[in-house]
Amino acid sequence: MTPSPIALSPIGTVHSCFTDKFGVPRQPGIIAEARGHIELIPPYNRREAVNELESFSHLWVIFHFNRSDRDEWKPTVRPPRLGGNKRVGVFASRSNFRPNPMGLSVVRLEEVEEKEGRILIHISGLDLLDRTPVLDIKPYIPYVDAIPGATGGFAPESPAPRLCVTFSSQSEETLAKLCPKRYPNAQQLIEKVVAQDPRPAYYNQEKRDKPFGFCLWDLNIRCLVQNGIATVVEVSHGQ
Amino acid sequence: MTPSPIALSPIGTVHSCFTDKFGVPRQPGIIAEARGHIELIPPYNRREAVNELESFSHLWVIFHFNRSDRDEWKPTVRPPRLGGNKRVGVFASRSNFRPNPMGLSVVRLEEVEEKEGRILIHISGLDLLDRTPVLDIKPYIPYVDAIPGATGGFAPESPAPRLCVTFSSQSEETLAKLCPKRYPNAQQLIEKVVAQDPRPAYYNQEKRDKPFGFCLWDLNIRCLVQNGIATVVEVSHGQ
C-alpha cells in the first residue's frame, strides 16, 4: 500500500545575505558572519508559538529547496565535496536535488524579535538562500542531536578554508563606504565565502583561471583565482 | 506574498517494534534495543539511491506524523517532560502536534539489505511508530550536526531511567518462549521501555497506581507501578 502524499504550507520565510546560489556555504555553521532571520508567515506569526525558543542555543530549520524543483528525480548525485566526479546515492547525500526537495540545516539562534506584529527569528551560521520557504523550526536538543562518536562518510572531516583571499584597493574602498547596519561585517563575510572556494566543481576543472562572480545582498562580487590566491577584484551595487 | 504549499510523497515506510504510541521513547537514541527498518517504496527502491550510505554511522529520518493530523494547529504545546502542565511554543518543542506534522529523528544505521528487489535500511535506537511514512533520509554529518557547546532548553539534560523494573513469573515464562528472531531482545527492550515510564502525564497525576498497558510488535504488555517500582505483570499475544 502506497502512503498518500501530504501537503505542507510554509510557516516562515528566510531573509538571508545569500541572494544567489553561488556563495552559499555548502554546510551550515561554517561562516559565523552569515546572518539572517526567519519571519513567521500569518497565521503562524504568533509570539506564543516561539515561547521558550530562546532557551536553546541552536535550531533546526527544515526548508523547501524551492529553486531545485525538478520533474524527475535521479537515484544518484555528484557531491561538490568529491570534486563533482564521483556519484553517491541521493539518500547518502544532502544534495538539494532529491525526491522530496527538503533541506535540513542547524543554525545558531541569536534573538527572537517582535516588531510591529512581525515575529523575526534572528539566526547566524546559515547556509540558506534568501526567500527560502521554511516548513518547520525545531529546537536543537544537545543530548539527542549531538552524537558522540558518530562517524561520517565520504566527505572530508572539516571544511578548512581552501583559498587565501586578498582585496583590490577598489573593492576595499567600496566596502569601506557601505552602511554597516545594512551590510554587517561585509568584508569578513566576503573573505570567508571566497576562502571556501565557491566556484562550482565544473569551474575548477574547465575555467580555473577565469574570473567568477556571486552576490551577497544586492552586491555583486567579482574574484580572480591565481596560484591558490583569490583576489576580490570588484564590489558593485545592483544585481 | 505567501509561498505556495508543496506536496510530498513518502519515499519509505518504517517497520518498528513500536506498534502503539504508548511505549515509544520520547526521543531517539535512548533505547539501543529498539530496532526496525525502513523499506523504500517504489519507484525509490533502487540500490543506487543508498550507495555509500553505509559509510555513515547515523542517519536523519524526516517523517510524517501521520497519526497526529489535526485540522487546527495550536501555538503552544505541553511537553510531557515538563509534567504536562507547562506550555511552551510549538516551535520550541519537538511535539508531534505542529503546523506541518513532520518529525525529525536521528537513528543508528545497522545495515542496508537488498532482499528480493526490496531495499531495507536496518536502524536502531529508534523512536518511530510502526508504519510511519518516511519523507526523507539524510546522512548524519558529525562535523556539521554534532555541535560542541550547544545548550538546550527546558528539558532535563539526560533521560535517566525513572522506574526500577521487575517481571512477574508469568511474564518471564511467556518471554522465554518467544522466538528470538521475531522478537529480538524482547525482555531487555520491555525493561528499558518501562524504565522510561511510558505513562502519559495525566496518568501520573490521576491514576498513579492503576495498571497500564502498551504494545510491542503484537505483544500486549501490562504493568503496575507501586512505590517507584514497575512490575511487568503480564505479556500476551494479540492486539
Image (tube, coloured by chain):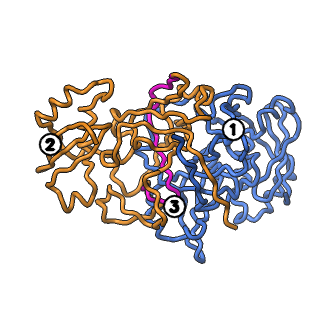
Chain colours: A blue, B orange
Same chain shared by disc 2 and disc 3: yes
Say whether residue A186 is left or right of residue B64: right
x and y percentages locating residue B37 in the rendered image? 44, 33
Q: Residue at x 23, y 43 (%)?
A: B195
Range of magenta residues: B95-115
x and y percentages locating residue A12 in the rendered image? 60, 62
Q: Residue at x 28, y 55 (%)?
A: B200
Say whether residue B216 is left or right of residue A183: left
Q: Residues within 10 Å of mark 3 (few under 14, many from 20)?
A: many
Residue denoted by label 2: B231
**Secondary element type, mark 1:** loop
The three-letter code of the residue at mark 3 reads Pro
Chain of the residue that carries numbered disc 1 in the rendered image: A
Question: Mark 2 or 3 closer to N-term?
Answer: 3
Residue denoted by label 1: A73
Q: Answer whether residue B100 is magenta in the image.
A: yes
